[in-house]
Image: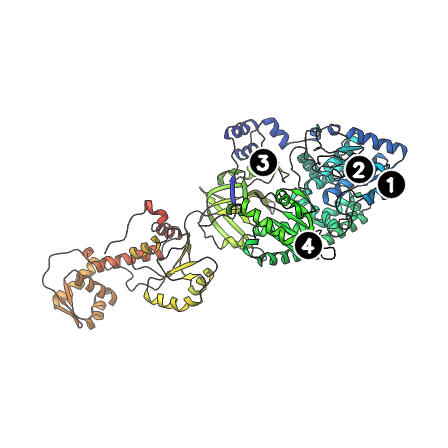
Amino acid sequence: MVKSKTRWKIEEVDQELALQLQQQLHISPLLAQLLVGRGIQTAEAAEKFLGGSLQDFYDPFLLDGMDAAVERIKRAIEHGEGILIYGDYDADGVTSTSIMIHTMRMAGATFQYYIPNRFTEGYGLNEGALVKAAESGFSVVITVDTGISAVKEAELAKELGLDLIITDHHEPPETLPDAYAVVNPKKPNCPYPFKMLAGAGVAFKFAHALLGDLPHHLLEIAAIGTIADLVSLVDENRLIAKLGLKALEHSVNPGVQALKKVCGIEGKVSAYHIGFGMGPRINATGRLETADRAVKMFITSNPEDAERYARELDDLNRERQELVEAIAAEAEQLVLAMPEEETNVLVVAKEGWNEGVIGIVASRLVEKFYRPAIVLSINSEHGKAKGSARSIAGFNMYEALTECADILPHYGGHPMAAGMTLAEGDVPELRHRLNELARKWLTADDYIPITKVDAVCRLSEATLETIEQLEKLAPFGLGNPSPKILIEGVEIADLRTIGKEQNHVKCQFRQDGVTLDGIGFKMADQAAELTLQDEANIVGELAVNEWNNQRRAQFILKDLAVPGLQVFDWRGTRNKSEKIKQLDGNAPARIVAFREKNRRQLEQHAGGWRTLHLEPNSATRQLVLYDLPHSYQELEEALGAQPELERLYCLFDEEPNTLPSLPSREQFKEVYKTVYHHKTLGHNDIPLLAQAKKLTPSAVLFILEVFRDLGFLNRDEQSYQLAEAKEKRDLTESIVYQRQKEALELETELLYSSYQSLRAFLKRFTLQDAPVKEKIYHGF
């Protein structure tokens, strides 16, 4: 048995609705299931979701406040007033700022832009920047991706004579800033039909409103910001991402071209390229320095400058990666050293950790340990700790921090991520309180990750044509994840580790005569738990593998389970001790040696084992059959005592049986005739008789013992003698004959059978198959 690493939560789908979509749109059953599972239940909605065009964008003036914002900017342009674009330092803020700069250029505005420093100014509008803007002669400040909570700063802007226009997408507070205009789809009573735009999306809508036409050339930058900000890729976000990704393939923007080059992106661009290539590089500059050069990259018209900025972003990203690796390694060591009562919520802190990357480190801890995690950077000079939190399903981090509000002067966020500042001395108290809350709120199952399964299918449905249809669901991201598919009861037909570090698994699955290639990245540790012809349930993603101009269906393995007993075929192993050492790990295993000689040898090594035991009748989940049992009864007693047996390792002693096969009845007759004729047969005469009858001495000895068992012969130290006449008896009445016959049958079943036959044979003896198992040993 192999247990899944995660809890599989299977999406319930209305099969009637799925069938209707399948018939109406002439699509595969699997695609129809996935559409219905994502709330797309009509043909019209499905066609819009799978298609999408420029005509599907909403009117930007449906955003409350857009009229006033556009009117004020147009007036500022007309009178030559100075406009300050106030941005943010993450990827969404950088792209929002870049979109607004391109927009102002096209509109002919007099403007500059400003992005605060993460380390010296922090997030959002700040009073110092507004004072400086007023002193520099600006009359209008327009924010992008920030400002919705700047109530105090909006009051200052008024006092300074600045008209503040806020464009943002974050959750609004109860009291909105008293600004000249506030444009945010989440604003109360805003009639805009889609509320989940990213900051780049709101900036894109503003560009559309100000310029009067949809700015096609800005779609690519809007897509980068939208995907990098991890907003839900549905409705208009999906439209921005889909059309923007297409535009990225043929971009003429020097900055975009340079960024693609350093990311190694050629041809088709996917959300993956942004999420794991472009986004991290843009974010790196704001995490380690200022985000200014990322903006310059997007807005320059000089290809050489663009390439220089892109290389600098790439260098900073490498530096960021090294920094994350170093801090993550330190944080993991702190976690491993924690007492168990402090590991329900991981709270780690150290002086000097870079504040710009601690959020990434917190995510790493969640990924590795699957516990809510808070990573704090301590500033001992000021006695403060500043941190980032990431959580797991079932533990609302924002609510948990609210429970600790008395020791958190500043905190904010949502159920899965948050930030906070507290006194250095209160860190132990925060750790204690959060762990107490976790003990109340979470169960043991909550500490097992969840995998949402979107659909269940047969292997035969995973065709290249179906997978190509599923690609229409892209781009994938939050709210529209890459579909996770469950295929049950597949045979593992091929299995091997690959990669430079042999940490990936290449495999092949078979079901009803159909095969499908599979690959599991960083799943080599699970390969050791599998064996060929295991029957597994697999969860993963269907994809197209393109190689040498050939396209083949492929399964990207994410998790698997093997229900029932696994049988590992270790027959033929020359160095048995090495094999056994492989099992001497964390999971207890027991070794059964049926032969006294082997048992004594194993006992000599038992003292050095950590988790291996020789008690054959003690219940265990892992059992090693070291040698061959003498009888069916021995085998059943060894296996029947294991009600929770999950893995059975078959080594078996391959020493040849002294009697490779049973003598024929004719050979029995020939030996009996000789003894009957001479009335006695000395032990020293057995080799001569064997030579005469073309038998082995052991075969002759076996025949003599069968006759003695049946009462036809007597035996003393020197010879076998003919007994008094007995009634006729069949050979099968002899216990000696039956035992040898049984031993040879067992040897054939256990040593010389195919793996499939061996597995089926052994499963008959386990309690898991008790309802259908027959008692096949003989009771003597």
Name the residue type under label 4.
Answer: Glu
- Name the mark nearer the viewer: 3 or 4: 4
Residue 195 is situated, as x and y percent measured from the top left of the image, at 68, 33
Name the residue type under label 2.
Answer: Ala
**Can residue 301 be seen?**
no
Crowding at label 1, few (<14), some or many (≥20) Cα neighbours within 10 Å?
some
- Name the mark nearer the viewer: 2 or 1: 2
Mark 3–mark 1 distance (CA, rounded to whole Å): 55 Å
Classify residue 148 by image quadrant. top right
Q: Does the CB distance between marks 3 and 1 fall below 8 Å?
A: no
Residue bearing the label numbered 1: 134
Q: In this view, does 697 lie to the left or right of 673?
A: right
Name the residue type under label 3.
Answer: Gln
Q: In this view, does 454 lie above or below 611?
A: above
- Extreme residue toward the left, this view: 725
Residue bearing the label numbered 4: 424
